[in-house]
Image: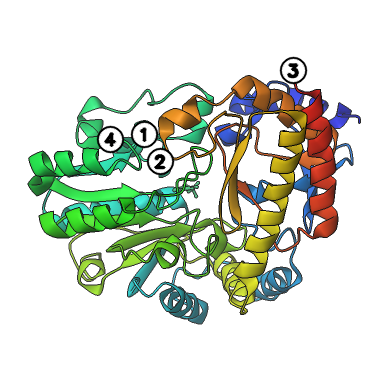
């Protein structure tokens, strides 16, 4: 398989683009080699600059739950293109997508659109601080909530891959207000709140952690978060930028039946275009400008293109049974991978919530803690990654990213993936 064109483009890219990429998770730093350049996506496949085809498990890092170029999304975009791209004023489609989001996630009574997940979490935290009149916030180890200054503490995949748990350039005073607790550790939460609960503005959490590979919440963890936030008057924020409309139509909050005060979403709601949103209880949401004193704004917020693509996508995935079917395919894929790893004698296990999954090169059969994720064999992952790539499967270039299955992944694609994995597992150094 030739990578000549990708290599050439990468050589050109590094000249004017730092590291040759516009987001660090696209670099191959965690797996070695040069990143591929892609020129097209078709259904479940990516086509690189040298015309190689790969089954795609990155899905644009989350949004592409219908695969690439789904006809209804493309049609919606085509129509909107002819109607105008930015009005600096409200549109009917914004009303429709707000209604749709509130219908699908009933904990969201009012919602504000922004242009990225980062903006959504940043704004939600500002709002929680404004609402409670408190400054301190809590996040969890290995959870990523965008590149917000105060949240770049033990912040998951991108930073983990680069071996930089915290970022330069973030004033210590900002992160002094951020408390980091271990994910899935209810007793640490309990003792922290007993000592500091009255000073906490909010707790922000990925209800299924998807930026330290894929780690579901252990039973009782999300419930304990809800309980402590209620008891101490802190705002509970579920960051569902990745999990929203992905792990189930109603997001992780519908799977685990725990209701946050605020929710941040993104990825799937833009259908592949830049978007984010935050929403929740009316009483809190009415504190943002122009109704209240918490300022928040965006020139391209509610971009007609992003909203058109998102609405089209939300309509398609709202069809009954869509997520069950997707979850079943994901299970087939993961069972197949497990079987082949076992046959090859490779220590391997997987996690799955709906159409989101994680693969771990580890002896333990259950992965629920950050420290376990960190103990995985990243050397093995590198070999596996490159071997899968050579056999036509594109995984995220990091052992710390979750994988995504789309409705375009059929039996053919799953079989192709399993055949590639069989070769990859048997070629791994023992
Ligand atoms: C991707 C992601 C973000 C950041 O979204 P961007 O659109 O990249 O800014 C925030 N939180 C979670 C859980 C994410 O997965």
**Vertical side of 58 occupied by 85: above or below:** below
Query: Which residue corresponds to the image point at 51% horizontal and 58% vertical from the top-left?
Result: 275
Report which residue position mark 3 lands on: 429
Q: Quadrant of the N terminus?
A: top right
The disc, 4 or 3, on the residue closer to the chain's N-terminal end is 4
Locate residue 23: give its quadrant: top right
The disc, 1 or 4, on the residue closer to the chain's N-terminal end is 1
Colour pattern of the rendering:
rainbow
Query: Which residue corresponds to the image point at 35% horizontal and 49% vertical from the top-left?
Result: 205
**Vertical side of 81 occupied by 122: above or below:** above
Identify the disc placed on residue 143.
2
Q: Quadrant of the C terminus?
A: top right
Identify the disc placed on residue 180.
4
Describe the element under mark 4 as helix, strand or loop.
Answer: strand
* Residue 300 appears in the picture as rendered: yes
Q: Nearer the viewer, mark 1 or mark 3?
A: 3
Report which residue position mark 1 lands on: 152
In the image, 162 versus 366, the foreground residue is 366
Q: Nearer the viewer, mark 3 or mark 2?
A: 3
Q: Nearer the viewer, mark 1 or mark 4?
A: 4
């Amino acid at each position: 398989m030739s990578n000549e064109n990708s290599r050439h483009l990468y050589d050109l890219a590094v000249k004017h683009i730092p590291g040759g990429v516009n987001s660090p998770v696209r670099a191959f730093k965690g797996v070695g080699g040069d990143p591929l350049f892609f020129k097209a996506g078709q259904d479940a496949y990516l086509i690189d600059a040298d015309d190689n085809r790969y089954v795609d498990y990155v899905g644009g890092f989350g949004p592409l739950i219908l695969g690439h170029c789904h006809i209804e999304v493309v049609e919606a975009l085509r129509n909107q293109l002819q109607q105008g791209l930015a009005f600096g004023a409200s549109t009917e489609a914004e009303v429709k997508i707000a209604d749709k989001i509130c219908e699908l996630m009933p904990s969201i009574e009012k919602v504000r659109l922004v242009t990225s997940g980062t903006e959504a979490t940043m704004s939600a935290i500002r709002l929680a601080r404004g609402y409670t009149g408190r400054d301190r916030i809590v996040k969890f180890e290995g959870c990523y909530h965008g590149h917000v200054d105060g949240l770049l503490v033990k912040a998951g995949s991108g930073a983990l891959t680069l071996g930089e748990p915290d970022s330069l350039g973030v004033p210590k005073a900002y992160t002094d207000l951020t408390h980091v607790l271990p994910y899935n550790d209810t007793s640490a939460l309990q003792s922290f709140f007993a000592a500091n609960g009255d000073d906490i503005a909010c707790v922000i959490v990925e209800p299924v952690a998807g930026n330290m590979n894929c780690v579901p919440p252990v039973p009782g963890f999300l419930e304990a978060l809800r309980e402590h936030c209620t008891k101490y008057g802190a705002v509970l924020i579920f960051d569902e930028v990745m999990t929203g409309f992905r792990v189930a139509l109603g997001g992780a909050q519908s799977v685990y039946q725990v209701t946050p005060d605020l929710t941040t979403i993104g990825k799937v709601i833009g259908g592949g275009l830049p978007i984010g949103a935050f929403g929740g209880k009316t009483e809190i949401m009415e504190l943002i400008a122009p109704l209240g004193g918490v300022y928040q704004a965006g020139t391209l917020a509610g971009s007609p293109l992003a909203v058109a693509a998102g609405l089209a996508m939300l309509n398609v995935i709202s069809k009954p049974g869509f997520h069950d079917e997707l979850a079943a395919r994901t299970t087939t894929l993961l069972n197949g991978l497990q079987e082949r790893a076992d046959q090859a004698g490779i220590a391997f296990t997987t996690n799955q919530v709906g159409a989101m999954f994680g693969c771990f090169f580890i002896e333990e059969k259950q992965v629920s803690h950050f420290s376990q994720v960190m103990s995985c064999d990243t050397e093995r992952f590198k070999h596996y990654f490159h071997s899968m790539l050579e056999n036509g499967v594109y995984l995220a270039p990091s052992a710390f990213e979750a994988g995504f299955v789309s409705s375009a992944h059929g039996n053919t694609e799953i079989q192709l993936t399993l055949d590639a994995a069989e070769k990859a597992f048997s070629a791994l150094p023992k």
